[in-house]
């Protein structure tokens, strides 16, 4: 089989690693698109900080033409966090018979936050015999790692998780999704309104494709499916993280001052028919110099087990999972799947071809 061929959609901070990792596994990037005029027309090596690859970054409007010309095995989307925002790019890829892997956090388990768009894209993927998957850091560190610990537990009463990440590492879309740069009043109006919603109001938003899930909303759905749990109720609470003093944000292009929002804590709690509580929290914020990423989970029961990852390289871990998932996605059945439908994550030792 010839080398795995990839088109990169979004040439920001994540793609720097993803594209390098693809070449290191003996794959190739055959096309790349972005919306940033400062990148369009430049070789992808500018992003990768490598020797020239002979692949120019083009405007996203050229995506259909690029896919038809290059005929890639996979398109990787590393742009937005909400499924609505990447729906058109996914449709374009699928209609060209191209599999899709995305770091879009909602796509990790979209059926419980945007079932209308999920059903549409799932049907489309099946019609064109391709696969759509959302994966990344959560695939291992919020998902399969937790599942493996549960498999070593006799009785579980509660699963509690907390993960922190620097929004500076992921670009402006993610930073704004966490309210970074907002005033307290703006945060309350735009984001914290979810805290005051009834279940009925939330379901109405979901039906209209207008619900904004925190990342852990989709992780809870994934964990419940993987562990064969049946959710009875779920709630989400978004809490602003305020700035104390001044803090520079390169991503936002501004100085945050005391009283401004620098990020968000989002806590999702679910009860299940099996009487196991899922309580998981993600904290995304502009870091101070003293802060670092953190991932800590406890499975309460017999026995109680805790695991903590101190200062994980969240960006690189996200990108490596995406790249290592490429053979699984190429070989998967068609449809909009989640990674519970794929084999367990694997480390690709040498190159893609050995796993296809």
Image (cartoon, rainbow, N blue to C red):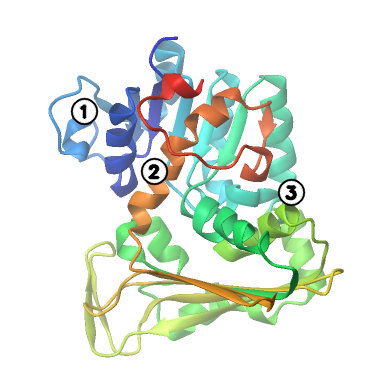
Q: Is residue 152 above or below residue 22?
A: below
Eyeballing the image, is 218 above or below 267?
above
- Element under label 2? helix
Q: Secondary structure at mark 3?
A: helix
Whether residue 113 is visible, yes or no, is: no
Look at mark 3 in the image and give the residue it sits on.
115
The residue at the point 40 percent across, 82 percent down is 183
The percent position of residue 349, horizontal first and vertical second, equals: 38, 32
Left or right, 42 with respect to 57, comes to left
Residue 85 is marked as: none
Q: Out of 355 and 264, give the one closest to the viewer.
A: 355
What residue did someone put label 1 on? Answer: 41
Separation of marks 3 and 1 at Cα, in angstroms: 37 Å
Residue in the foreground of this view, choosing between 317 and 242: 317
- Read off the residue under disc 2: 320
Q: Secondary structure at mark 1?
A: loop
């Amino acid at each position: 089989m010839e080398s795995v061929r990839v088109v990169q959609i979004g040439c920001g901070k994540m793609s720097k690693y993803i594209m390098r990792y693809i070449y290191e596994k003996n794959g190739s990037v055959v096309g790349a698109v972005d919306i940033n005029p400062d990148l369009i027309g430049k070789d992808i090596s500018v992003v990768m900080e490598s020797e020239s690859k002979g692949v120019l970054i083009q405007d996203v409007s050229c995506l259909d033409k690029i896919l038809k010309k290059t005929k890639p095995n996979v398109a990787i989307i590393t742009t937005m966090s909400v499924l609505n925002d990447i729906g058109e790019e996914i449709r374009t890829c699928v209609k060209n018979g191209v599999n899709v892997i995305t770091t879009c956090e909602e796509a990790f388990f979209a059926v419980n936050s945007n079932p209308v768009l999920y059903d549409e894209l799932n049907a489309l993927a099946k019609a064109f015999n391709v696969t759509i998957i959302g994966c990344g850091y959560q695939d291992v560190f919020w998902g399969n790692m937790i599942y493996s610990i549960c498999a070593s537990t006799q009785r579980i009463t509660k699963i509690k998780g907390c993960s922190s990440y620097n929004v500076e590492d992921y670009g402006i879309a993610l930073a704004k999704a966490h309210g970074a740069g907002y005033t307290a009043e703006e945060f309350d109006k735009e984001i914290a309104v979810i805290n005051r919603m009834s279940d009925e109001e939330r379901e109405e938003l979901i039906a209209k494709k207008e619900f904004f899930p925190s990342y852990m909303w989709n992780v809870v759905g994934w964990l419940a499916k993987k562990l064969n749990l049946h959710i009875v109720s779920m709630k989400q609470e978004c809490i602003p993280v305020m700035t104390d003093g001044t803090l520079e944000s390169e991503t936002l292009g501004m100085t945050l001052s005391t009283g401004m929002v620098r990020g968000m804590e989002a806590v999702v709690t679910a009860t299940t028919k099996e009487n196991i509580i899922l309580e998981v929290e993600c904290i995304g914020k502009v870091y101070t110099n003293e802060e670092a990423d953190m991932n800590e989970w406890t499975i309460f029961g017999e026995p109680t087990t805790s695991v903590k990852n101190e200062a994980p390289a969240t960006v690189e871990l996200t990108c490596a999972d995406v790249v290592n998932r490429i053979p699984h996605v190429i070989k998967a059945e068609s449809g909009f799947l989640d990674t519970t439908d794929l084999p367990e994550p694997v480390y690709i030792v040498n190159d893609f071809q050995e796993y296809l």
